[in-house]
Image (cartoon, rainbow, N blue to C red):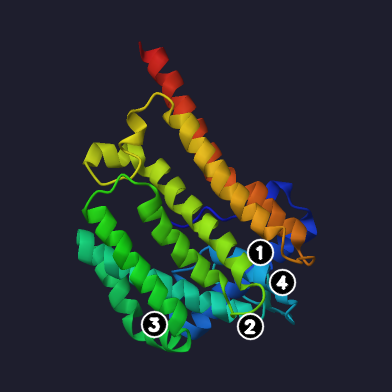
Amino acid sequence: MFGYVTANELELKVKEFKKYKAYYCGLCQCLKNKYGVSGQMTLTYDMTFLILLLTSLYESETKANSFRCMIHPVKRTAVLQNEFTEYAADMNLILSYYHLKDDWEDERKFFALTGSTLLKRKVKMAVGQYPRQAAVIQRELNQLSEFEKTKSDNLDEPAGCFGRLMEELFVYKEDCWEEVLRRMGFYLGKFIYLMDAYEDLPEDMKKGNYNPLRKMSENECYEESCKEIFCMMMGECAAAFEKLPCVLDVDILRNILYDGIWKQYQKFQEKKSEELTDDKKSI
């Protein structure tokens, strides 16, 4: 369900791209050091955005370093790390564990059983350190599972679960910025869930899987309605972001929120257009 909150790297300046990648590599290294290779495998670009956001908001001291990456062993890889790198690593692990656990319990996916088993012992430390976030993640994923079992076609029900989950991750500490961060995380979470459902719909239709957009897709204005919903979600998220006093790396953050977040949607539209062209040629 993740992979949407990424930068449009082509639109970043060279120094911005290097910094963005350094935070990503810092998160990767942190996951490996704290939780081993199995923890490292949960890595996502989405949490890199959270690191950038919290670093900019709280102006945390960040340490620069370098290491030799197994994937790129010839040249040393630059990394940037701070307190939010560790926080994002812990949130990444907790979310991945409960998501895999639910996938096994609901759909009996073997890889989910394997993954959750590998992470089970390691996740206890993160859960103990962040009980508030862990409790909300577990509660909302359980509620989401119930909505999926009852095949709810009310978009706000399942999307709201993922929204509340994400808003809790955004609240590093309960202070004067909590309300704005919650609003930002809530709408970003709803966007991620519905975008994932939109992209999965064709496959879900074939397999008979649950998808909250199934009923809505029967309407002639389905595509227009989806785009309107996505724009509304990201409009609310971006409006909340602009209330934060972020200066450091604000261009990278805006690149992600106003451009990068739409990369998957654009790729999906291009794929659909190509398939339609191929169908016309075959007639």
Instruction: Specify the amino acid type for callout 4.
Output: Leu
Q: Which mark is residue 123?
A: 3
- Local SS, label 1: helix
Q: Are marks 2 and 4 in contact (CB under 8 Å)?
A: no
**In the image, is residue 179 above or below residue 36?**
above
List x then y, in percent, for residue 18.
73, 62
Left or right, 188 with reference to 207: right
Marks 3 and 4 sit apart, C-alpha to C-alpha, by 27 Å
Query: Do the residues bearing badges 3 and 1 touch, measured as CB atoms within 8 Å?
Result: no
Lateral position of residue 61 relative to residue 174, left or right: right
Q: Is the residue marked by circle 4 packed among few (<14), some (14-19), or many (20+) residues within 10 Å?
A: some
Label 2 to label 4: alpha-carbon separation: 13 Å
**Frontmost residue, 194 versus 35:** 194
Foreground mark, 1 or 4? 4
Per the model, the C-alpha gap separating discs 1 and 4 is: 19 Å
Of marks 1 and 4, which one's residue comes earlier in the chain?
A: 1
Q: Which residue is mark 1?
A: 21
The tag on residue 57 is 4
Q: Position of residue 272 (x, y in %)?
A: 45, 29
State the CA–CA distance, disc 3 to disc 1. Answer: 26 Å
Q: Closer to us: mark 3 or mark 1? A: 3
N-terminal label among 1 and 2: 1
Residue 54 spot, x, y in % from top left: 66, 72
**Tag 4's secondary structure?**
helix
Q: Image quadrant for the N terminus?
A: bottom left
Amino acid type at mark 3: Val
The Cα atoms of the two marked residues, 3 and 2, are separated by 18 Å
Q: Nearer the viewer, mark 1 or mark 2?
A: 2
Looking at the rendered structure, which numbered label has been put on residue 83?
Answer: 2
